Amino acid sequence: MGVQKAFFDPNKSVTAKVKDLRVHHRRTLAWATFVFDMDIVSKQGAASHVNGRWTMVLEKRPAGWIVVHEHVSVPLAE
């Protein structure tokens, strides 16, 4: 299942705000980390809010930079 099916197909709107973006670079590798706030409204009208962290690892290849690994996590519900 891709991002399109997971986030956009079942929802009327998805709004995200990126905070604390940090990008690091060493030769042909780079990694980026950030936190995000996401507001989601389903097609049925139910609203929800998600806070999370995202990490991406990129590698420089002949065609350009590509994401070779990413990880998203959200805090556990209390």
Image (cartoon, rainbow, N blue to C red):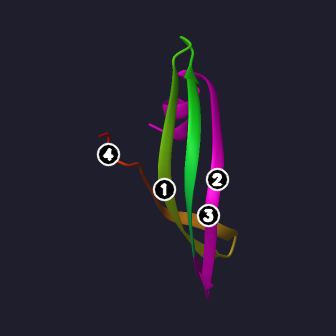
Kindly report which numbered mark, 1 or 4, lies closer to the viewer in this rendering: 4
Kindly report which numbered mark, 1 or 3, lies closer to the viewer in this rendering: 3
Q: Which residue is identified by label 3? A: 20
Pointers 1 and 3 in contact (CB under 8 A)?
no
Image position of 60 (left or right of 78): right
Mark 2 / mark 1, whichever is N-terminal: 2
Q: Are there few (<14), some (14-19), or many (20+) residues within 10 Å of tag 1?
A: some
- In space, the residues marked 4 and 3 are separated at their CA atoms by 21 Å
Image coordinates of residue 17 in percent, x first then y, are: 65, 47
Q: Which residue is identified by label 1? A: 53
Q: In this view of the protein, which residue sits in the foreground, 75 or 61?
A: 75
- In space, the residues marked 2 and 1 are separated at their CA atoms by 10 Å
Image: magenta residue range: 1-30
Q: Residue at (63%, 65%) from the top-left corner?
A: 21
Mark 2 / mark 4, whichever is N-terminal: 2
For badge 4, the amino acid type reads: Leu
Residue 21: say if magenta.
yes
Q: Which residue is identified by label 2? A: 18
The answer to whether 40 is drawn above or below residue 29 in the figure is above
Image coordinates of residue 62 in percent, x first then y, are: 68, 75
Q: Residue at (65%, 36%) from the top-left corner?
A: 15
